Image: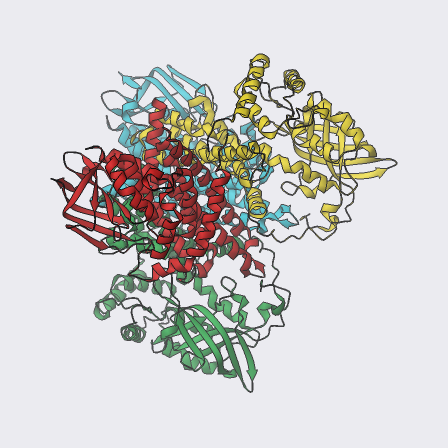
Chain colours: A red, B cyan, C green, D yellow
Amino acid sequence: MDFDFSDDQKFLKGEARKFLEARSPVSAVRAVLDDPAASYDKALWKAVAEQGWLGAAIPEAHGGLGLGRLELCVIAEELGRALAPIPFASSVYFLAEAIMLAGSEAQKAKWLPKLAAGEVIGCFATVERPGVLTESQIAARVEGGKISGAKIPVTDGDIADLAVVLAKDGQRSSLWLVELAGAGVKRETLQTLDPTRGAARLTFTGAAAERLGEAGEGMALAEQVLNRAAVLLAFEQVGGAGRCLEMAKEYALQRYAFGRPIGSYQAIKHKLADIYIKTELARSNAYYGAWALESGAAELPTAAAAARVAGCEAFWFAAKESLQTHGGMGYTWEVDCHLFYRRAQQLGLVAGAAKAWKERLVSELERRNAA
Amino acid sequence: MDFDFSDDQKFLKGEARKFLEARSPVSAVRAVLDDPAASYDKALWKAVAEQGWLGAAIPEAHGGLGLGRLELCVIAEELGRALAPIPFASSVYFLAEAIMLAGSEAQKAKWLPKLAAGEVIGCFATVERPGVLTESQIAARVEGGKISGAKIPVTDGDIADLAVVLAKDGQRSSLWLVELAGAGVKRETLQTLDPTRGAARLTFTGAAAERLGEAGEGMALAEQVLNRAAVLLAFEQVGGAGRCLEMAKEYALQRYAFGRPIGSYQAIKHKLADIYIKTELARSNAYYGAWALESGAAELPTAAAAARVAGCEAFWFAAKESLQTHGGMGYTWEVDCHLFYRRAQQLGLVAGAAKAWKERLVSELERRNAA
Amino acid sequence: MDFNDTPEEAAYRAQARAWLEANAPKTRVGEVSHDDAPNLEASRAWQRKKAEAGYACITWPKEWGGGGGKAWQSVIFGQEEAKVATPVNPFAIGLGMCVPTVMAAGNDADKQRFVKPAVLGEEIWCQLFSEPAGGSDVAAARTRAIREGDGWVINGQKVWTSGAHYSDFGLLLVRTDPDVPKHKGMTMFWIDMKAPGVEVRPIHQMSGASNFNEVYFTDLKVKDSQRVGDVGEGWRVALVTLMNERLSVGGGGTGSGHRRVFKLAGDISTLAGMALKDGALREKIAEWYVQAEGLKYTTYRTMTALSRGQTPGPESSISKIVTAGLMQEMANAALELEDQFGIISDPELAPLAGAFQMSLMAAPGLRIAGGTDEILRNIIAERVLGLPQDVRLDKDVAFKDIPTGR
Amino acid sequence: MDFNDTPEEAAYRAQARAWLEANAPKTRVGEVSHDDAPNLEASRAWQRKKAEAGYACITWPKEWGGGGGKAWQSVIFGQEEAKVATPVNPFAIGLGMCVPTVMAAGNDADKQRFVKPAVLGEEIWCQLFSEPAGGSDVAAARTRAIREGDGWVINGQKVWTSGAHYSDFGLLLVRTDPDVPKHKGMTMFWIDMKAPGVEVRPIHQMSGASNFNEVYFTDLKVKDSQRVGDVGEGWRVALVTLMNERLSVGGGGTGSGHRRVFKLAGDISTLAGMALKDGALREKIAEWYVQAEGLKYTTYRTMTALSRGQTPGPESSISKIVTAGLMQEMANAALELEDQFGIISDPELAPLAGAFQMSLMAAPGLRIAGGTDEILRNIIAERVLGLPQDVRLDKDVAFKDIPTGR
């Protein structure tokens, strides 16, 4: 039994925290929030690339560090904690994983080194309308290598160079790689709940599309990518929830009411204890997901769903109750609570809401019970 | 706007409370609980009949007091508060209501006076298996006026004289009146969570059955009876929840820990505030149900479902958290908390669980929105 | 028990409705905030019209400009007024809290001076109690008033002041003696919001809006005649004001929340099909409906007590805490239904014009404003259920010696 | 990160499994309670076998009868032992709490006298701390010990004592000086449970079972040599004992709860059809699963720390509070599925042999025993998060002057 990260991985985590505390303080996050033109922190993105984090799980042969997914998990937790305003998830959890999962040797050779170097920002474009994605709803089509249709919302679609797009050429959908600098691509930046993580509507009118993976396997491949991303996002959520708990605790210790720190009142103490409980449950589920991801276990669909459900619940609860603990101050723009409240929603929705993952989880359990 | 009970009705409520505090103290409830042979309090039943409560809503022409359902509501709240161990609901909310709803003049003339006088105990026998009752599941059949089949559980089936039974004679089911003293009736007392309200399995082997109401309308009629009963049961639930809150408050004031009454700790104060909130929401929904019941309004199905859902939630929450407030003492047989914990389940299940009523409620709302 | 008016009520309602149809302006004006400048003139004009017809401050005596009517009349008029388009009401705080305080504790000159102009909508008041270090603990006011000649000099800061930017006068709670226990060392004044030494700054909320202000006092000079009540009696005077506040914050339209979810669920799909057919959502809708209806009928119970000439019970104390929690829960659930699309807050693109994204960002404020969830539970536990106060370390010591962590 | 044993662990596991297969009795014996009399002999025999093979108290030094092994070995043996049928373990409290306390604070004679017989299962211990007036407030012990000659005379009552009816010895916390603050006036003794002056009465629980006792002391005479630790040091000694308790109460098999619901939902129908297809139930199952799995993997994290020779983090403190809440919630939801039938508790008739009816009646006890939900949240807030204690009125006054409401 060795159900924890190794000392090396824990060291990497410590280094990542120090690095992000220096390079991605909340002031930097606010800079992106307050500047309508900015949708990510370019300097941080460059620095993160120099750290090699973008390629942590990319094989050395393709310009990565050739470490494992576990290393990516500890980095993800710190990125979540720091609310890092960069297209890390879109580029690494979605695009790089999609290419490593389904890409041809040529595609891997072409794109992975650029991704590892931070020269390419990615995005994952599947959804076209409100509600859960189902194959029947996909209207985007590819004819003769040209794609038409619109995808909304696409996280980081406003800044991405390369998109993984879900579109049909026959009855069923496939995944496609689309270079967004090319002709036939229109991007419109969207107004969202979390301006520190930009999103756009991508409209394709005959843009060049190159198939990624088996024809007609688009939905299946997209789900496999989502399973991988869900585990990594769960670590970002655990990191964010942990930071909310710290902020609530710090405030509860220094804020006095009726002659006592509010942290000495049971209403606050028990609220924070509940945040701790949910965060630990989310952490343990995330660890299991990390194990399944790293070991390529058959349990990944269940493990990923459990990690996602627990992660969404923990971060949302921590964000809203940490804000509540801050009282009136927590509702002001100046105090950071709302940055976490916004990010909790962004992370909770970007790979599909917990509601849909609960259904996936139970279907998996049924399949297992049947087997 | 006159959305409250009249002074007369409030006076009746006060009298009912005094009466039950004298005639139905918890010691009397425990007497039924501790005696396996006893399934109700005969003396209390007789006294309640003498008060005229059984016939409160039965027309004077049929030996009742000819008051309204509102009077029944205030009595119900006090019965719930007192955990009265008598077959009041089975006889009054179910049997009497069923006969007043669907009975022929002859049936009304024959049974209502006896019910009002307490000479007949009733029961409502519809369910045959675990899960929500649906017409397809009904196996009980009537051929040539003889009924065969088994109903389980039947609250008060072990002591009832007359049962309303749901059974088929054609494709669809009808309601039937079956005298349980007659031949072809077997009763087996059941072991239940709340021994202060007995239940039995009734097995019919050719017992005489007389049709009650339109042929084939059994399910529809049963639902109308359930709507009426749900409102009255909601008042019992509000009464029970209110008493749980009182008990928790009394204990929290006299029990000291760490040199202070536990009622001065926010964990307890906020728990009790939550009980109060749920109880008030249940009370207001119950009042609306009372209005719909008394005025025969078309809104009754919605109002009854809302009253039931809120009543179940309030009593269950109040019972389990009042017990928790009592700590270790609350878990002992000697302290009364478990009597309310048991009754909360009994009232929460006897007319079908809240889960099913939520579905009914939303279906009604859909119908309304469509209209 | 019925929902119908008594003949008397019906007659009053008919009369009120007729008057409203004849007199109410036809267009509603946007909320008075820093974002969209107030359209105060329309509000003032409407208030004056009501006052002249006896429909402003209906329960107040005629000699003060009120309607000399009953509580149930004011309830009925309120219901009818809510049905027609009327300007926003920037007078609620003044007429609901400040002016009644002046009437209860002020001197005759002040009553003569202030009551009627307020009723007529000529002068707007704001309430200056909360402070940065205070929050839920209103009696911790640190804003200091020091005697100077026959007047006072005030320095300090107030916060969460609604309407300070368009108010003419303010009711100000200050500390006049830090050497006695906190509740004994305060005094109440009315101040001219336009006087030198008063600076109003908007508070930037997380929602982006600015419905509240910070108000700074720098050597603000006030006459002793501006004192409302005796020196050291400030807390007792403040309690008169606060009694009304929590009611006035109140609901906030969850009543329609579950209907909105219905609408959303009608044209959105889950993995299992149309959202409205999803059992989990259906159960939640039922639970929300029951709570919203419960609140509605709870207010009916309160109104019934009024129309019977009785004092309402404490049940209305549950309204805000339930409303705020429901608002946050429904908004989050609705976004889950919208799934990835839920992140879009642009009213042009988001379902129902982004109503749920908006309420998600507003809900945290509602859970805090006018008493946090936690303070309201304390109030229910102590004032309704009669449970003891928590241990107080701030009662029997000089205010200046109360621990503040600083 | 993996679930596989290290070679060292695998070797130990294989050896333990082989030994268990060769030696474990094949039939499990019912719980030791007042309802079904204990089958202590089987338990004693099994304990002796383990002790002789070094599998009892694996981490204890050999000279005390232990295995002289590592924490991870004891974890692995526990996992393997759980897989085979073994008698119930009435020694847990003695070996988990009482005897370690004697080893830490007792005199040499007592250590020589008591440790080995306990390890060998020859003598069973119970813990006598809680009192009727105490409950969560263990340090409020009122049971009084008064010096008499070279010994003490004890009068009072303890409550919630597991196993008192079959224990040979008890670890007893008493008040020796009511004139000093509560934590300073207590002393610890070991007592002979069969001595005159000790009376054990079963507690009748709401579930009908009796797993605990009240223990009454009437002029019980103990020698001063039975003292464990110094006079007045009782609380410090008790803390040694209590440190282990909350862990030992721990989980309680919710792990399988959601599977049971699965099974139930498979052959029950709702208004909408088969329960297992009901979206509301499916979401609940997912939420329960995630919590139960979360607890499972949390214990894996703890075990990993042990097998790495590190001290586990505080995460295990969440186990009981989550387990107890889940148990009550799942039981209630399952009864809702059974609908009217849910009231039937007869194992012959109720689905799954009445498992959910049973857990519904057991859950309130689990939410209270070994620390209520509320006390456990305090502990997490104070010991894990470092938040301040609530205001204490019972610390700096003589015990006899602490308010008790009587």
Q: Is C120 left, or right, of A141 in this rendering?
A: right
**Residue C100: where, in percent of width, then height?**
44, 72
**Residue A371: where, in percent of width, then height?**
34, 21
Q: Is residue A221 above or below residue B14?
A: above
**Residue A178: where, in percent of width, then height?**
20, 45
Image point (54%, 37%), residue name: D316
Which corner quadrant of the image does residue D84 belong to? top right
**Residue C214: where, in percent of width, then height?**
43, 70
Please name whichever residue, A176 or A120, is drawn nearer the observer in this view of the structure: A120
Please name whichever residue, B279 or B65, is drawn nearer the observer in this view of the structure: B279
Image point (44%, 55%), residue name: A323
- Judged from this view, the residue extending furthest toward the bottom is C149
- Judged from this view, the residue extending furthest toward the front is A61
Which corner quadrant of the image does residue D288 belong to? top left
The answer, for residue C291, to whether it is visible in the render is yes
**Quadrant of the image containing the N terminus of chain B:** bottom left
- Judged from this view, the residue extending furthest toward the right is D149
Which corner quadrant of the image does residue B103 belong to? top left
Please name whichever residue, C61 or B62, is drawn nearer the observer in this view of the structure: C61
Please name whichever residue, C12 or A152, is drawn nearer the observer in this view of the structure: A152
The answer, for residue C289, to whether it is visible in the render is no
**Quadrant of the image containing the C terminus of chain B:** top left
Q: Is residue D120 above or below residue B15?
A: above
